[in-house]
Image (cartoon, coloured by chain):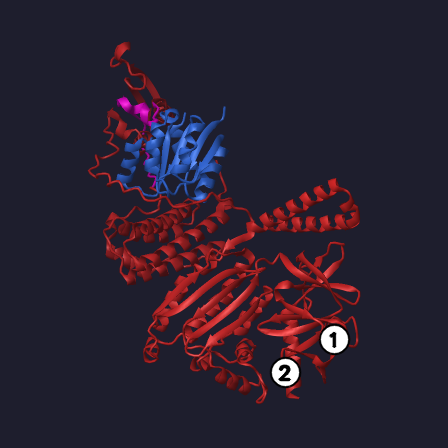
Amino acid sequence: MAKSALIVDDSDVMRQVVGYTLREAGFEVTEAGDGKQALGKLDAGTYNLIITDLNMPVMDGVTFIGHARKHPLQRYTPILMLTTESQESKRQQGKAAGATAWMVKPFDPDRLMAVVAKVVR
Amino acid sequence: MTIDLSVFQAAFLEEAREHLATLERGLLALERNSSDEDTIHQVFRAAHSIKGAAGTLGFAGIAGFTHQLESVLDSVRECTFVLEKSDISTLLEATDQLRNLVDAVEDNRSIDSSSPKLAALVERIGSSSSPRGPQTPANETQMIGSRRLQLEIHPKRNFFAIGLDPILLFRDLEALGTLSDVTCDVTSIPRLSELEPTDCNISWKFRLETTAADQELQDVFLFVADDCEVRTTAIELAPSSPNSLELPAVARKGRPAAIESATLRVSSEKVDSLIDLVGELVIAQSVVLQLLGEQAVKRTPVMRDAIMSMKRNMQELQGRIMGIRMVPVATLFGRFSRIVRDTATLLNKSVTLEIEGQDTEIDKAVVERLADPITHLVRNALDHGLETDRERNVAGKLEPATIRLFAEHVAGGIVIEVSDNGRGLDATRIREKAEQQGLVRPGDSLTDEQVNALIFEPGFSTASEVSSLSGRGVGMDVVRSCVDALNGTITIGTKRGEGTTIRIRLPVTLAILDGLLLRVGLFTYVVPLLAVTEAFRPEPNAVCSVTGAGFVALLRDQALPLVDLGVQLHLADTPKNPCEALVVMVEADGRQVGLVVDALLGQSQVVVKSIETHYRRVDGVLGATILGDGQVAFIIDVAGLVRLAWSRSGATEAA
């Protein structure tokens, strides 16, 4: 069965790049433009991976991670946060909310897949 | 896996430009209210997004530049730095430069991505608290010989609960070398009755023989460092994450969610081809109806109902598809807050910009082509229309100098106005100037309106001359030709000492046109309905023949130059008697002309087909269309005809 991923990012470009990379790697990809939109997609099933940006309008990534982690279907889903802010505080907030791993932007597809491999079986 | 990221370039450019617009808008808003938290966040996020995407797609220059911008905005966001007006100017300039950098990507040019001013600002703030640069962490590869390590992994209880999986650690470690003597410690697993199945209660010990550098080994544990105790012996494996003393920032109060609608990006060619297709369908439909014959349809109620429903749906479809192309004029007006601010600063005038009706929708193609002429009008109004602050004081004008942009829907079209409350046009001096330049002769009788319209004549005056006049006129002919090309009209309203309003009337779209169908000889022609004022048959005593200029009709005590369409279109050699034909009065640029035609056939919405793209530009003809009966009809270029008629009648009056 194909692995599934949910990508949450307000940037079309980033969603396209990440989505393309994951699809190439055999993932089935669902996209959302902000945390709130993404919340609506959590009921669809347990994802093998959630990738989320942190700085987004409407609902930011940290808040979304908190909700996603509490969602019954996503309790053990690896959540990867994308951020250009490599600041420790932001990362700690994300981790405290339940993020599994993080990735500092910018990244190329190879580096993304290397990180994905660290959190997805 | 190699992926060519250049396919995302177009999307990047489009998105970056949107963010740039947000950035600019936000900075201007901050200039008025520097503490608006929502705006600060928006502006920061715009810079942040550009940086992220640029870095990912490998545009290092843009990423680096935006990083500086972002770090300034970050300090503002964190309230460690308060923006002065001069800082905002610096940031706006940086935004411009960033836009140039983005444009350069599209044109495949490389340009300088340094900004001393911005760098100085970053320096002043002290970038210690700013986010780290976009550069990827250096991959140091130290070559080390093979070594043996003893490792222990003690995951914390909540290990699974944040989506971690110990198996992945082993998979990574295996890739680094040889694992041996792996033992699993299950002694901490509680009795079944106390077991919480989601907790992690096991730990491991093992040996690893590897040539990997410390960094690589640390990378394996990068994400588990906080949730797992890792001990290495044989060599010291530094803890990968120092304890952080930073406290999480206080959660911000819930901000009202921005209204964002889900959108779909589609290339405009796709929409254009839909419009073309639906246009063809509309034509095909009328051909079918004509073939069936009106009587036959009326006699068969079933068929009539089916046809009515088809017509309705077709109309709806056409409307909806046209709607895709419509954008609010806000996309056009938006840029002017910046232009007005910068130009006013340059001219040392304090100017307020008022914008009204920016939700009015108009064809995107029209909006794009309006940008230059409107910019021109706004600059002119700022430069020549508005007085200096002192002059206003002297004149006793209490209200602030204002530029007003206004848009609204009118029947069959849209009106856009650029007004100022400045000094107004001085008809006497414009006339003087025009006489000097030979545009009119002394003694020509012209209304003030006609005099004012002279500023649209090519060759009327130049910048320096107009600045000293209380008028304007820099390249106004260019503005008019832009509006003409859009099948629109332009008029001036002005009052000495009170201001000037330039009014542009445009069709909502270039693709479809409400037309009046006329017959000239054996042929059918279309005149844009927007240009038609009235139609009448003149009384014999109200028409006089003027040597060299054909006929002139007197209508409500005004002389109306008549253009015989048959002669104009080379269908006839001599003009027909207007009293035996019909006169259709059309207007362009505030001037009227009567078109002499054989008959009016009715009103119809026609799909405009360009002749230029298939053949070449034809003077006097705007385009062509296919009528319901399959006949091809030309659409008359009213503005061109009006100008022609007036230049001729002007010459005659003087003769």
Chain identifier of the residue bearing label 1 in the image? B
Q: Which residues are magenta?
A: B138-165
Q: Bin the neighbour count of mark 2 within 10 Å (Cα to Cα): few under 14, some 14-19, many 20 and up.
A: some
Q: Bin the neighbour count of mark 1 within 10 Å (Cα to Cα): few under 14, some 14-19, many 20 and up.
A: many
Q: Which chain is red?
A: B
Inspect the image, locate mark 2, and give the three-letter code of the amino acid beneath it: Gly
Image coordinates for residue A51, horizontal then vertical, percent: 40, 35
Q: Residue at x 48, y 35 (%)?
A: B1
On the image, which quarter does residue B469 sit in?
A: bottom left
Residue B142 inside the magenta-drawn segment? yes
Q: Nearer the viewer, residue A6 or B477?
A: B477
Q: Is residue B153 visible?
A: no
Q: Residue at x 64, y 63 (%)?
A: B529
On the image, which quarter does residue B380 sit in?
A: bottom left
Front position among marks 2 and 1 = 1
In the displayed image of the protein, which residue is found farthest to the left? Answer: B245
Image coordinates for residue B160, horizontal then vertical, percent: 32, 23
- Name the N-terminal-most of marks 2 and 1: 1
In the image, taking residue B130 as reference, residue B623 lies left or right, namely right
Q: Which residue is mark 1?
A: B578
On the image, which quarter does residue B30 sit in?
A: bottom left
Q: Nearer the viewer, residue B537 or B98?
A: B537
Q: Which residue is mark 2?
A: B650
Q: Nearer the viewer, residue A20 or B302?
A: B302
Mark 2: secondary structure: helix
Chain identifier of the residue bearing label 2 in the image? B
Inspect the image, locate mark 1, and give the three-letter code of the amino acid beneath it: Pro
In the image, taking residue B411 as reference, residue B88 lies left or right, namely left
Q: Which chain is blue?
A: A
Q: Quadrant of the C terminus of chain A?
A: top left
